[in-house]
Amino acid sequence: MGQRIGPKTVRFTSPPNILSFASVAGKAEKDGAYGLCFDTTFDDGLWGEKTYELAERKMLKTAIESAIEKASLKADDISYLFGGDLLNQIISSGFAARELGIPFIGLYGACSTMAESLILGAMAVDGGFAQYAVCATSSHFATAERQFRNPLELGTPKTPTSQNTATASGATVLTSVRGQYPAITHATTGRVVDMGIKDVNDMGAAMAPAATETIICHFEETQRKDDYYDAVITGDLGTFGSELFIKLAKDSGHDFSSVHKDCGAMIYEGNPHVNCGGSGCGCGASMLNGYFLKEMLGGRLSKILFVATGALHSPTSALQGETVPSIAHAVSIEMGCGQ
Amino acid sequence: MGQRIGPKTVRFTSPPNILSFASVAGKAEKDGAYGLCFDTTFDDGLWGEKTYELAERKMLKTAIESAIEKASLKADDISYLFGGDLLNQIISSGFAARELGIPFIGLYGACSTMAESLILGAMAVDGGFAQYAVCATSSHFATAERQFRNPLELGTPKTPTSQNTATASGATVLTSVRGQYPAITHATTGRVVDMGIKDVNDMGAAMAPAATETIICHFEETQRKDDYYDAVITGDLGTFGSELFIKLAKDSGHDFSSVHKDCGAMIYEGNPHVNCGGSGCGCGASMLNGYFLKEMLGGRLSKILFVATGALHSPTSALQGETVPSIAHAVSIEMGCGQ
């Protein structure tokens, strides 16, 4: 059962456990500093498929199937698949769900989707609606570029604040079964925040205020101190957006500079060609399910706050002169709470 | 708390009540047989706005605000807005959520979104995560035509099996507060079904198998007889899809011909210009929140099964030669269960 502890935050009274997780990533992500963390990688954007869209679908399906297999479960054991991606009509998720046959709840939260899916999955499990649920997202550089900006064939130069949509996917199996697992203890659901950014190549700046609001709200509503978590992990603010977040939080009296990590800034660490880092819902999903949860199981991290941020514009809204509304959701994941 | 009673069906042990509801519709819908049922209507696709997209956003925001106001609540009282629409990146919902300031869970289930949002809203309320939640969707003929098919300016003729995307919106406020309201007692969540239909102008045929599977599954898992409900209401199969559904169900040994209603077939009743009827997530949403729930409060219906169906293709997937995958979710709404 849930317990509301503030206007945006709930506590899970029987914290759902993360039974298993899996990640898939492409070439640039494999060549990054965390490349060895991903379960499955491939060297070509198409991964043997005819189109990039089919490759993305294959990534998502592979991540979900791997996570289910690692839990020694079958697709039939899963009550709900909470999934979404960046493509119009979330076709990566819809078509992957067709092949998996799991009851499907389609989500769109742009790059915030991994946190959104974990919140809903945790509600379903803690609320008694599911013994097992899978939460998953994906993104692909080539499918996102041609849909949101320009097809790769055009060779459009990137601006200095731009981020690189990660070709990656992650999936998490949640369960009501008790045990020594990372457990989801709290969730803070964000509202849509818009500070008037109009540059669709500057997502980090658009999303930083949403991240700041949700994170500060989480700390206030849980009455936790700024250093409570071993890591406060944003999904894809990138290097510029991360600086902005640290500054905005400081302006509000919170110092997260020693615990903040950003999946977007990390995923291409050491690669000078990607400007401000990674983005896309696969970025946070793959780093959470490829790196951070392994660090928790290995005892190197015991409490993390995973905060995925999303920019909720569309090419149509941008062409119509709209600014970029953003959202951030926070999920508290802790060891020793799911026994 | 939820209780699983089958692989796809859950029972809400404290059935969430439908505290209030509201609907908004455009000209063609106002001129239909149920035109007087909608709370707010307008006579021009733009509704005083500069673009059709802005008009759709206004519809959705108006429906949500009206529903909240009818419940004598304020936006701040609502813990979650579960919303989605047909537009890329669900901009109608994202931008409406920006103006409302309610914590936002973005959904994409094509025309199944109203049922999807009710399932998640009911889980949040019954699971103790929210005292009040709003579930809402919208669609607009002009925004959908130019995104999924052709801009209206082209004057493309419609095929005989085509349906007309309804310009309409609906919103429902769910609550844990007990009382004499229509209550959500069960939910059956569908998987993605694909029978190989490739004609994107024949959505009814693509969605009928998904509706059939979910509805039969609901009756089997709840062990209810075919005549248990006063009405089994599909969202937007249209006239042709409805015939197909009745036939497919009969082939499986179920006869719903005397209780089946389709919002798509109903919304333009008497208007010969709309071929197979209405579609779009606003179609089912406006008929549920404009007509059926009023019939329940008026004592003319006491038990209904609301089944919204969605086609999960995109223009990209169709151009790439994919078939149309579909999904249907069923929500059981009953009087006398929420006291």
Image: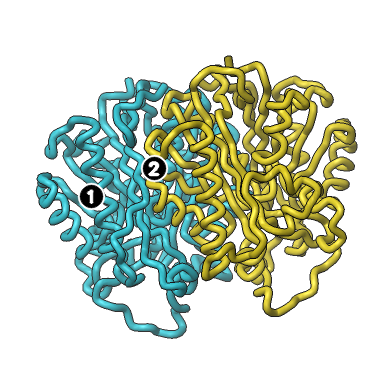
Chain colours: A yellow, B cyan
| Among the 4 quarters of the image, the one containing residue B270 | bottom left
Does residue A187 sit above or below B278 in this rendering? above
- Identify the residue shown where x is 40% and y is 45%: B22
Does residue A113 sit above or below B163 in this rendering? above
Residue on which disc 1 sits: B212
On the image, the x and y values in percent for residue B97 come to: 59, 48
Q: Tell me which amino acid carries mark 1.
A: Thr
On the image, the x and y values in percent for residue B200 come to: 36, 70
Q: Secondary structure at mark 1?
A: helix
Q: For this rendering, which residue is in front, A44 or B258? A: A44
Q: For this rendering, which residue is in front, B72 or A248? A: A248
Cα gap from disc 1 to disc 2, whole angstroms = 15 Å
On the image, the x and y values in percent for residue A197 come to: 77, 58
Instruction: Answer yes or no: is residue B32 visible.
Output: no
Q: For this rendering, which residue is in front, B190 or B29? A: B190
- Of marks 1 and 2, the one in the foreground: 2
* Left or right: B250 in relation to B207: left
Near mark 1 (Cα within 10 A), the count class, few <14, some 14-19 or many ≥20, is: many
Q: Tell me which amino acid carries mark 2.
A: Pro
* Left or right: B248 in relation to A204: left
Near mark 2 (Cα within 10 A), the count class, few <14, some 14-19 or many ≥20, is: many
Instruction: Answer yes or no: is residue B15 visible.
Output: yes
- Identify the residue shown where x is 15% and y is 34%: B228
**Quadrant of the snapshot with the C terminus of chain A:** top right
Residue on which disc 2 sits: A103
